[in-house]
Image: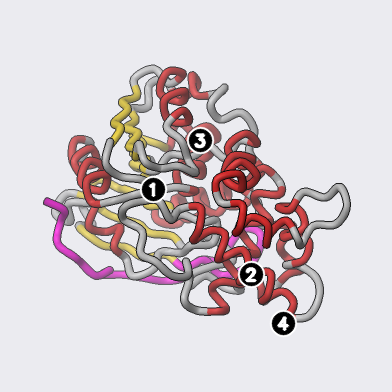
Amino acid sequence: MMHPPIEPYMSATLAGPGGGALYWEESGSPEGTPALYLHGGPGGGLGRGGYRRHFDPARYRVIGLDQRGCGRSEPWAIDALDTLDDNTTQTLIADIEALREHLGIDSWLVHGVSWGSTLALAYALAHPARVSAIVVMAVTTSSRAELDWITSAMGRVFPEAWAEVEALAGPGERPLDACARLLRTGTTEARQRVADIWDRWEATHISLDPNVRPGPLHDDARMRLNFATLVTHYWAHDCFVDGIIGRAGELRGIPGVLVHGRLDLSGPAVTPWTLHRNWPGSRLVIVETEGHGGPEMAQIAADAIAEFA
């Protein structure tokens, strides 16, 4: 069974290396094995803290971080558009390192979901000595091929919804680039319209996942705007990463578990499969009945995390 819900025993903000205030929280056992959770998005935030149930609170010192520009970190991307160019994967990695040093942690297990799996892998490649193990779920590496698949290729499956995104693009412009551009310019009302279109697209391309509820991806309009701004900023720049799968051999010596749903249409299993084949010592678990997350996948991830305590 998943572990029972717990609340943080500590939370605070840390001055980010590139500015801003980064929200972090700590739960579980102060004497436990250190573990870091990286949320999805980019721009998703820690939310209500359901991630804590993936960790045995008696055995893990669990650290959650709201990545810069979202969640309870300040300022939000939409409130500081002039800082958006400084919001990159490399900056997020520097934020993670600043938090690790602030907390006096030598190395930690890193657990990421969706975009958080890309960030976990990028962090491990940059600082392998600081990562004791990796457990990732709904695995992405944010390659150009993956980003093209989740946008234009999925547009062939859901042409009605994709047509609304395509209509935003100028001549010869990628719809993704158009969204990123428009979400940084124009009036708040115009940006909100683009964000609402993007939210409908996100809700559509994951709609065949058996665990997805109908309706908007984000109910709150400001959250829709912030999320869309960060996602399109990162995706338009190939998430500021290059060749994670090709570099996976560098993770040799770091044990890893990859958990992925067969029914994840917009994130097909070829990504974790190829990553696993290139990463000596990794283990891949494909869940046949789930998509971009679900209770069985979460339980498998929790069981894998327990093995590393």
Kindly identify the amino acid type of the residue bearing the numbered disc 2. Answer: Ala
Is there CB contact under 8 Å for labels 3 and 1? no
- Residue at the location (42% across, 71% down)? 12
Q: Is residue 32 visible?
A: no
| Local SS, label 2 | helix
- Among the 4 quarters of the image, the one containing residue 84: bottom right
Q: Quick one: 286 or 115, which is closer to the camera? A: 286
Q: Earlier in the sequence, mark 2 or mark 4?
A: 4
| Local SS, label 3 | loop
Q: Earlier in the sequence, mark 4 or mark 1?
A: 4
- Residue at the location (38% across, 21% down)? 253
Which is closer to the viewer, label 3 or label 2?
Answer: 2
Kindly identify the amino acid type of the residue bearing the numbered disc 1. Answer: His
Res 190 label: none
Q: Which residue is mark 1?
A: 292
**Span highlighted in magenta in the image:** 1-23
Question: Where residue 193 appears, x then y in whole percent?
Answer: 68, 75
Kindly identify the amino acid type of the residue bearing the numbered disc 3. Answer: His
Kindly identify the amino acid type of the residue bearing the numbered disc 4. Answer: Glu
Q: Which residue is mark 3?
A: 127
**Marks 3/1: CA distance?**
27 Å
- Among the 4 quarters of the image, the one containing residue 166: bottom right
Q: Earlier in the sequence, mark 1 or mark 2?
A: 2
Question: Where residue 222 appears, x then y in whole percent?
Answer: 57, 78
**Marks 1/2: CA distance?**
22 Å
**Marks 3/2: CA distance?**
35 Å
Q: Which residue is mark 2?
A: 195
